[in-house]
Amino acid sequence: MNPQDLPPSPLINLVPVPEPWISVLNHPNPALVNQAALVLTARTIDARTHRLDGLWHLLVRERDLMAAKAELAAHRDENRITPPGVLPALQTGNGWWAVAAFLAVIWFVPWVEATWLLPPLKDAGAFDVSAVRAGEWWLAATALTLHADLAHIATNSLFGGLFGFILGRWMGAGVAWLLTLVAAMAANLTHTLIQPEGFRAIGASTAVFAALGLTGIFAWRRGVLQSGDRKRRFAPAFAAIAMIALTGTGGENTDLFGHFFGFGYGCLAGYLASRLPYEGIGTFGQWICSTAAFGVLVFCWISALG
């Protein structure tokens, strides 16, 4: 009798068939995959990692696939997994409050002039290098609320409202505009180091460019555009630089240094602000920041008119 004619051995049926491992997550960043593996291990789900075709895969047994997906989804909802060194983006407040606050401030002066039949306030509140050097530092704030004409204030309303809405959602209206005001005032005061005697400037564009820099760097540092693609990570900063080049460098009445310094101080503020614990500030903290920003403007105008 030939061996092939023998009946199959019953022992063959006793040999276990290996259970397949299935990829439940893949990503180019091994740290993210390893962190997800720890999540599953903590839930007593057997998991391992494997690199294939440039991606790291998180593998689980077939019987654990649905449970692993559910655990990872629950973990993402509670504490979104991010690469090391990148903080998650936030939605702290309603961006419309920031828009309303900005528009109210820059439209208040022309409304007062028209309603109360007051003379133009530009003489009292315009940024004047000679006056600031003589000690009238408050002009660095009052000048932000003055505009040359309707086109000037309309343009600043559009772009300031846009960046105010974004920042208001990310960090809250109070924090957003307090940081923007401080950055814009610092930019105007820096004028005194380079501008000649008699130089004067008005407009919220310095604050708008401060908000632009704050938005770009904050988005980059907080990882708003999270992806393994570096181009997408740096996109906000590149967009901010492109915008300052396209909208802030032309025209004979353009305050180029004001835009440049505003953008620079805004970037610095965005870098520092990216590490603030916004979830701990709360509504009361936002109101304190709003009151502080408003109080600074009121004090500066009282000083300018006094």
Image: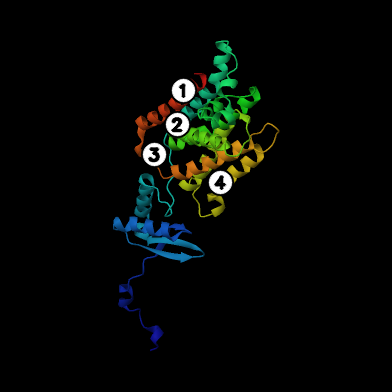
Q: What residue appears at the point 65 percent right and 42 percent down from the top-left corner?
A: 245
Among numbered discs 1 and 4, the one appearing first in the sequence: 4
- Residue 241's place in the image compared with 47, above or below, is above
The scheme the figure's colours follow is rainbow
- Residue 56's place in the image compared with 279, above or below, is below
Kindly identify the amino acid type of the residue bearing the numbered disc 4. Answer: Ala
Quarter where residue 208 is shown: top right
Label 3 secondary element: helix
Residue bearing mark 3: 278
Q: CA distance from mark 3 to mark 2?
A: 12 Å
Q: CA distance from mark 1 to mark 3?
A: 26 Å
Looking at the image, is mark 2 or mark 1 nearer the viewer? Answer: 1
Residue bearing mark 4: 237
Q: Nearer the viewer, residue 116 or 56?
A: 116
Which part of the image, by quadrant, shows the N terminus? bottom left
Q: What residue appears at the point 53 percent right and 50 percent down from the top-left corner?
A: 233
Quick check: can you spot residue 220? yes
Provide residue 278's location: percent of width, then percent of height: 39, 39
Q: Is residue 121 left or right of residue 43?
A: right
Q: What residue appears at the point 39 percent right and 31 percent down from the top-left corner?
A: 286
For the image, the number of numbered tags is 4
Q: Which mark is residue 106?
A: none
Looking at the image, is mark 1 or mark 4 nearer the viewer? Answer: 1
Residue bearing mark 1: 298
Label 4 secondary element: helix
Residue found at the very far front of the displayed protein: 134
The 10 Å Cα crowd at callout 4, few under 14, some 14 to 19, many 20 or more, is: many
Q: Nearer the viewer, residue 2 or 191?
A: 191
